[in-house]
Amino acid sequence: MILSWRISKEGFNPSSIELDGSRFLIANGYMGYRGTLEEFGKNELVACTVAGVYDRYDDKWRELVNVPNGLFVKVYYNNTLLSPMTFQDCAHIYGLDLKDAYYFRNTKFFVDKEKWIRIKTKRFASSTDYHLLCLEYSITANFDCEIEIETGIDCDIWEINGPHFKEMTFQNLDGIYVTHLITNEGKNLVVAETADHLVNFIDEECLRLYVRKSKVKLARDKEFKFYKYMCVTHSLEFENSFDEAIKRIIEAKNLGFDSLFEKHRSKWQERWSICDISIDGDEKATLALRFSMYHLLSIAPYHSEKLSIPARGLSGQMYKGAIFWDTEIFMLPFFSYTLPDVARNIVMYRVHTLDGARRKAKEYGYEGAFYAWESQETGDDACSLFNVTDVITQRPIRTYFRDKQIHISGDVVYGFFTYYNATGDFSIFLEGAAEAVFECAKFYYSYAYYKPLKDRFEILDVTGPDEYHERINNNAYTNRIAKFTFEKAIWLYDILKEKYPNILQEIDSKTCIFQYIEKIKETEQKIFLQKPNEEGIIEQFDGYLKLEDIEVEKLKEKMLHPYEYLGGGNGLATQTQVIKQADVVVLLNLFESEYEKEILKANWEYYNRRTEHGSTLSYSMYGLLAAKLGKLKDAYEYFLKTALIDLEGNYKQYVGNLYIGGTHPAANGGAWMAAVFGFGGIRSEETKVEIEPHLPTHWKSLKFNLTIHGNLFEFEISNNKILIKSTRLKDSKYKTYRIVANKREFIHKIGQLLEINLKGE
Ligand code: IFM
């Protein structure tokens, strides 16, 4: 059923447990709790994943930890568990309210002829105290009966590369259950839980399950309700995580569910008042966008600049909970233009992990900073050299993601400037981002080869965004992002020299930038960029156009196994022009203004036919460019694909033997970009905003808000006019903006209403 703020499903299908767990996630940036039922356990992939707390067990992959489930509840009638898993005859509906950010379920069990017992729950990850998860549990029967409730903490945890807790102890403090956990790496975590309004307990401690059992008499049609609060704290944040957890759980209990929920709700209202997008004429697209933004808003690091957003959000331990280029290139635009404070945290994470990037550069014998392909809390690279296992031979495949996807350093720099362009906030550069930009420029300088006969610098032996072609030379995207890094390093150098000489001096003491700047300038001038050929095609890398040109579907017919990896040394795609994901098309989106429309079009068409979209990052880039080009049918199809990824669950769950399910925040961010930058046609540069809309024909209007340089803009775009309202936020120093639409320029004063007629004057 679709209502524009709610997604729900009816009935129970065991095969959708896994996807629903991701789809119906609740989270608050501190932790994520999967959309599973209260009676579920580790086999149903219940997980409460804590942001920024990583651990390694033995020689397995280091990943985020999942903590015990303090929201666990089982209800029995006549010794039978009331769960759609075990109980055939039931009516079950569950889902998410996106507006108020809570999960709900409503299950009616027909226990005997006309007799039924109904379980209704509602839970949320508090947006005002990030340590809290709150659950309301209500039971009603249409006959007098007795039920048994079992609730407490389930410490039998779903872990991909665990076990992560070398110690786990349990305490009962006057009805507050507390588990104290110590990770293999020695971090302390506390999970405290309490269940309010339940009496007559018998405490029970079974293996890894701490529960109270309580018998409750239900009077006919009279609702029985109880509340559970779960609090998570850890030693990366508090000296005494135990006391903090107890304090918070007591506070939660005293405040009660309703007032906690009210606070949570108003925080989300505040967020939506800025972020919401609505489309008149397309309810499905509106819902898909809201769903995408709900996920982004749930997992954002509101409370810390030492956290970013992992590739699978907080939906579990997939991809090691690591942060990839996904964040800077796909998610950051959304945050920069809606919640700049959160965007600032995201960019500052890269400043805090600069030392890890320096270590990686050094490890490979380069200068400067080579950011981690898979970054965790220190910035050291969690990516392994054998990241995929061949499903046919069961042998590990040597992948060159870690060593050769050097575009990551430029992506980080690009991210700093996405934030800066949207906000005008130069302070990030003074607080470490300039140092990071210089270090990235040094890295590319040391990686590049000077070819004297050609008098140019080339970047050899890399892997571009298309991971199926590894160790190639002069990847178009990589070379351009390296040049961008040089350009920005030079720009920053000049500004610092003029305005902040002391800071530049200080940065020089850590980077020796004075010694490097001339070399960086020379490399910037002479770096080789792939240029369009006679047909207008930009070769993805040297020799790409000479590879076998085979259709994607034809290539796939040759596969021996559905999860077979197409890249790597023996991959089917390696010797062909079939690519995994947008590569040149990313380049064209990021540097669109440097290319003629015909070139953009020719390349979109050429690469579109050869792209497998084996990564969920791909659709949005094709959708975005298609929208900018006014290719509305293709744009709309790709937009829906990216926006519906987690709703429809149409994506690869495995690569080789590797489980890569979970949520897809990069696709969510891409959906936002396709709507705002693509269909809305917004481009902003300092205080100039260009608007070149291309709305799908069935859209009557598209409404969204953007914060640009500290002011809030409300856009309403329809086929014949654009309405712009603006409000001054905080203490923005900008009072007027140049708006360019329909080849005309308008001066817009903050606070005034601007109406632009698109049909004529
Ligand atoms: O960052 C991506 C990469 O581009 C393709 N493989 C998955 C990664 C995480 O989303």
Image (tube, grey):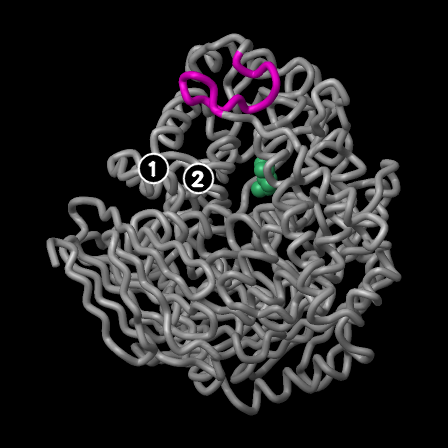
Q: Is residue 102 magenta?
A: no
Query: Circle 1 is placed at which residue position?
Result: 626
**Label 2 beta carbon less than 8 Å to ligand 1:** no
Q: Pointer 2: residues within 10 angstroms few (<14), some, or many (20+)?
A: many
Q: Which residues are magenta?
A: 532-545
Tell me which label, 1 or 2, sits earlier in the chain: 2
Ligand 1 - quadrant of the structure image:
top right
Q: Is residue 539 magenta?
A: yes
In space, the residues marked 1 and 2 are separated at their CA atoms by: 8 Å
For image coordinates 41% across by 26% down, the residue present is: 603
Q: Secondary structure at mark 1?
A: helix
Residue 561: image quadrant is top right
Tell which of 691 and 81 is nearer to you: 691
Query: Circle 2 is placed at which residue position?
Result: 621
For image coordinates 73% across by 39% down, the residue present is: 522
Q: Visible in this render: residue 392? A: yes
Pinpoint residue 628: horizontal percent, then vertical percent.
Answer: 33, 42
Question: Which kind of residue does numbered mark 1 sit on?
Answer: Ala
Pinpoint residue 371: horizontal percent, then vertical percent.
Answer: 73, 47
Work out which residue is located at the far bottom of the displayed protein and give it: 254
Tell which of 88 and 557 is nearer to you: 557
For image coordinates 43% across by 11% down, the residue present is: 554
Q: Name the side, left or right, on which 47 lies relative to 732.
A: right
Tell which of 339 and 749 is nearer to you: 749
What secondary structure is the magenta-colored segment mainly?
A: loop
Q: Secondary structure at mark 2?
A: helix
Question: Which kind of residue does numbered mark 2 sit on?
Answer: Met
